[in-house]
Image: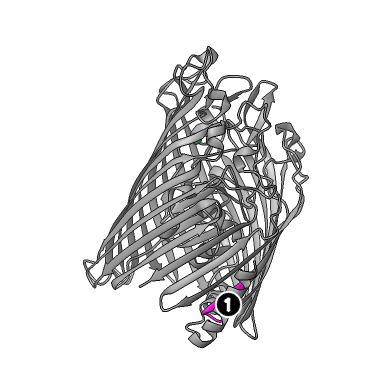
Amino acid sequence: MHTYILALLTLALICQTAGAEEKLLLDEITVRGQQESPQEETLSIREVRESPAKDMGEALKQVEGISYVRKGAIANDVVLRGMQKDNINVLVDGVRLHGACPSRMDPPAFHYDFAEIEQVKVVKGPYDLSNPGGLGGTIDARTRQPGKGPGGDISLNYGSWNSFNASATASYGNEAYDGLLGYAYKYSDVPKSGDGKLLTEIYPASNPNRYKPAAIDSRAYEINSAWFKFGYNPTTNSRTDISYTYQDADHVLYPYLKMDADYDKTHRVNWNYRITDLSPLVKELKLQAYWNQVDHLMDDSLRATSTPSASVTRFYSMQTDAKTHVYGVKLNAALAVGAGTLTSGIDYYNRNWDAVNRRAGYFSYRDLAMIPDVAIDNLGLFTEYELPLGSMVSLKGGLRGDLTWAETGKTNTLVTAGTTKDFANVSANLQLSYTPRQGLDIFTGIARGTRTPDQQELYIDVPGNPSWRGNPGLDATVNHQADIGLKVSSEGFYANASFFYSDLQDYVNFYQASPTLKSYQNIHATIWGTELGSQVAMPFDLFLRGSMSYVEARNESAGKPLAEIPPLRGAVSIRYDNSTFFFEVQENLAREQNRVDTGLGEQRTAGWATTDIKSGFNYQGFTVIVGISNLFDKQYFSNLSYARDPFQSGVKVPESGMNLYATLTYKF
Ligand SMILES: [Cu+2]
């Protein structure tokens, strides 16, 4: 610790003489204060790189209103305002991407690397009509664009528990062509929590799901990603680009669950064509086509349950082989109509999901159509109009219609192959932005958002005790939501407050249907919440930041809380930043969560407080960041750490204990 502080002081001295460059942080505050609507947030890649986060799901927890489900060292699943899974859209460049694992070992945000991303945009609430679903909000990661001339960067990160992350990108661009290449490699050993135990040691000695001795201290994950993007500008007002990413994740441990992943192999292709200022009427025309596919294999070969016996005759006692793909096309046009802009579009996607489960014992390893090769097709049309009413008021409203078909390709005990089910949905919203004076923005919105049940909620079939089955009779969820947001900003300051109320008809709720069966039901639910965020630039290059999020959710049909809702949470930080050198201390706080769904066996989670410190400097393209998170080595749990089926082990997964990390980046 002493050496660390000494090193910081030395750095501070060096940087005093190095001289300040652009005021990056100040610019960020100005953008957040003056250019973002109160119900929008952004996470910059700078903030991601400064954090010890292992993936985007974890990095996003810095954003007000976002938390995550931890199932292991990586692959955290994003929760926005208490909404998760298909209730929110988690996209990359507007591309729909779904994981293959029925236990969400590979949520969408797991499938792209930090180094591919420039910025993440978060829209809270159902205000994005250009994509179907996402009744709780949209999280869209934007990938990096190649710049003019040669460019590139190298990033090396090393931290506690032998965690390593290296990435490199190189790009070149001129007026007509540009291209970008990237590679990332990361792995880690198993992290320890505050009590000094490995995440793989959380099981009691008698628990059948405990790790085998040889697996306890094995790799927690190992992931290789490679990608390219190639762009061509045929004219000064048009551009086409194509990008491809391959990601290979191996040996990913999930102490939360009864199985671990052998591999995840992901392909992503995205093609865009865009033309601007085509005529006085047509301001922009955009065509997009994409395809992605995930192969996922998980089993219990690292657990005691796979110990050979009379019934366990293979290297595993349970295994799930899951595959998914999504392809889609979108055509959008922005037209100058009257004093405003009319944006209209048509889009289509096909999402296929197939999962085969094999288990020892009674099932004698025969193939069970867990998710029976279900295709979901969606065709949507939307139109929205944005009208500035003078300099102070802007009105935006729109309408979207979706037709959705689901068709099963296999038979299980719930459904026969060739079964179809249709949905028709209408989404709409009206948003009013009012700026009575410079530095004061008021946002109000009312919206209707919808989403159809997914393949798992409709048709999953996991026989056993308890068995786990979908509900083929589920209806689409309809969310009626109201939002109010207020933002006050000036040079180097902003404060943002937002409040929402959401009434959900036919919310898809997971529940204990009988002592031996867990399933899904449509219920009436309400969710309300609030977020506060503020950043202030003070004299002497000091910056203060604070945030607070709260959400409360109720199963109105049963008169009890909804499961897996985060508690009151907040963070405060103080940072010295002269644009060359920074030092930051942050305190993170969460209250106890006692609003739990006892019907699902959800338990209270204690409140906690942790402290993070970090420091860094940049000099001529080099950036060095050193940090310690959970400085006082607290043993604590996120409330979302144990209760999700299928194949949950029921054992709570603690958050990481004190951990050090260092990142070196060179950009040219
Ligand atoms: Cu899995």
With 111 as the anchor, is 269 left or right in this view?
A: left
Q: Residue furthest front?
A: 3
With 235 as the anchor, is 29 left or right in this view?
A: right
Q: Is residue 340 above or below residue 107?
A: below
Residue 19, visible in the rendered structure:
no
Residue positioned 24% across, 72% down in the render: 174
What residue span does the magenta drawing correspond to?
577-583
Q: Is residue 547 magenta?
A: no
Residue 335, visible in the rendered structure:
yes
**Mark 1 nearby-residue class (10 Å; few <14, some 14–19, many ≥20):** few
Residue positioned 44% across, 48% down in the render: 111
Residue 68 in the image: state x and y as whole percent.
Answer: 60, 49
Residue positioned 51% across, 52% down in the render: 162
Q: Is mark 1 within 8 Å of ligand 1?
A: no
- The image quadrant of residue 356 is top left
Query: Toward the viewer: 605 or 496?
Result: 605
Q: Secondary structure at mark 1?
A: loop
Query: Toward the viewer: 492 or 198?
Result: 198
Q: How many marks?
A: 1
Q: Quadrant of the C terminus?
A: bottom left
- The image quadrant of residue 178 is bottom left
Disc 1 target residue = 392
Query: Toward the viewer: 428 or 604?
Result: 604
Residue 215 in the image: state x and y as whole percent.
Answer: 53, 35
Query: Toward the viewer: 374 or 582?
Result: 582
Q: Is residue 11 above or below residue 366?
A: below
Under mark 1, the amino acid is Met
